[in-house]
Amino acid sequence: MNPGYVVVGADSHTCSNGALCAFSTGMGSTDIAVAMALGHTWLRVPESWKIIVRGSFPKGVYAKDFMLHFIGTVKADGAAYKALEFTGLAMDSLSMPGRLCMSNMAVECGLKWVYSTQTRSPENFLKAAAGQTATLP
């Protein structure tokens, strides 16, 4: 998996890869089988929401806390088949694990895809996770 890839998976939490700059979404098993057999799929373009998180998270508040609040605000189906982009100063300070946490949890409000703007290189994170030499941006 690399930034810019289109990733489909049989699990709803496949959207976690949005933190790594990939279009990534969960699909049903029949749709996954067709995508694997044919090498392509069809998706309706989702309505997009841009969520600007201003300021910074107070000490002791983490990505998971933010997502629990967000999901509580929009409710379990409040972002059904939407694309969410998280951006802003608070997002700039998040670690890659924090971004992955947010992307993983965002499916709980019904979204199709989630993306967070990058101030850090996802390529470097992936290289470091694979034990390869990473360069800092």
Image (cartoon, helix red, strand yellow):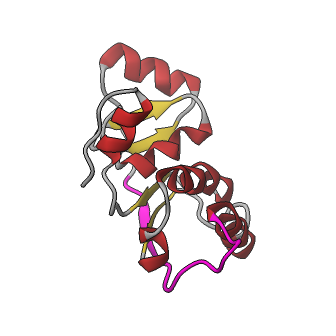
* 75, above or below 20, in the image: below
* Magenta span: 45-62
Q: In the image, what residue occupies the spot 39% across and 23% down?
A: 35
* 17, above or below 73, in the image: above
Q: Nearer the viewer, residue 107 or 97?
A: 97
Instruction: Please state the horizontal and vertical placement of residue 131, each as a whole percent of the image.
Output: 39, 26
122 sits to left or right of 99: left
Q: Nearer the viewer, residue 130 or 84?
A: 130
Q: Quadrant of the C terminus?
A: bottom left
Q: Would you say the magenta stretch is mainly helix, strand or loop?
A: loop
> Is residue 78 magenta-colored?
no
Instruction: Please state the horizontal and vertical placement of residue 136, each as a whole percent of the image.
Output: 27, 51
Instruction: Please state the horizontal and vertical placement of residue 41, each as a whole percent of the image.
Output: 35, 32
Q: Nearer the viewer, residue 74 or 58?
A: 58
Q: In the image, what residue occupies the spot 29% across and 39% down?
A: 134
Q: Quadrant of the N terminus?
A: top left
